[in-house]
Image (cartoon, grey):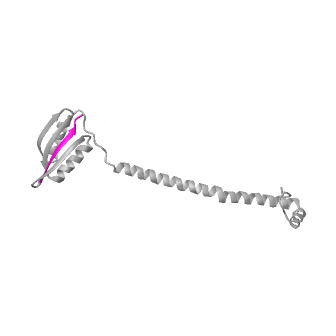
Amino acid sequence: MIRSLAVPAALTQRWQGLALRDRRMLMGLGIFLTVVSLFSGGWQPAQQRLERGERLYQQRLLLAAEVQRAQPTAQRSNPSRSLSNRLSETVAAAGLELQQLDQDGQSLRVTLSGNALALLQWLDQTEQSGAVLQSLSLEKRDKLLVAQVAWRAD
């Protein structure tokens, strides 16, 4: 293999002048240096990138778990209770005044009034509990907010 490379004649003569033991030690040193340079130039950076990728994956996995915990869970109410019963109970608990409650077909129409913030919170909580809002009409009367809401009654 050495003869196939363009090696200066002086270097070839010097190689031939070395003892067999010295030539073997130089070839061993060459192989050792080749292995060390392949390790430090190829294997080690690949392992470092792998470790960095694993750390990033673990960080993102933890972040995804935190995001999942932070998202509000839709609290489904007990399906055995009718929507009208659940709505009337939660309206009273929110401190709102239920003025009218009508059910026709697949729709439940509710008219209620109260503090604007309490009413909006009640609407949000009712929707998060699984009720499906069909229409909403809000009207301000004095210091109260009056809402006419249609819910889908499944």
Q: Which residue in the rendered view is the most extreme toward the bottom?
A: 10
Residue depicted at 59% across the width and 55% down the height: 47
On screen, residue 31 versus residue 84, left or right, reads right
Percent coordinates x, y for residue 129 in the rendering:
26, 42
Q: What quarter of the picture does the N terminus occupy?
A: bottom right
**Which secondary structure dominates the residues rendered in magenta?**
strand
Q: Is residue 153 on the magenta stretch?
A: yes
Please give the name of the residue rendered at 11% of the width and 55% of the height, measured from the top-left corner: 143
Residue nearest the observer in this picture, 51 or 92: 92
Q: In this view, does 144 lie to the left or right of 34?
A: left
Nearer the observer, 18 or 138 = 138
Q: Is residue 125 visible?
A: yes
Q: How many labels does the image show?
A: 0
Quadrant containing the C terminus is top left
Q: Residue at x 46, y 54 (%)?
A: 59
| Residue at (16% x, 53% y) in the render | 116
Going by the image, does 76 lie left or right of 110?
right
Q: In this view, does 137 lie to the left or right of 18?
A: left
The picture places residue 51, in percent across and down from the top left corner, at 55, 55
Q: Does the stretch in magenta take in 138?
A: no
Residue 96 seen by the camera: no
Position of residue 23 relative to residue 85, above or below, is: below
Residue 40 image point, x, y percent: 66, 59
Residues drawn in magenta? 144-154
| Rendered location of residue 141, percent (x, y) | 10, 52
- Nearer to me, 59 or 83: 83
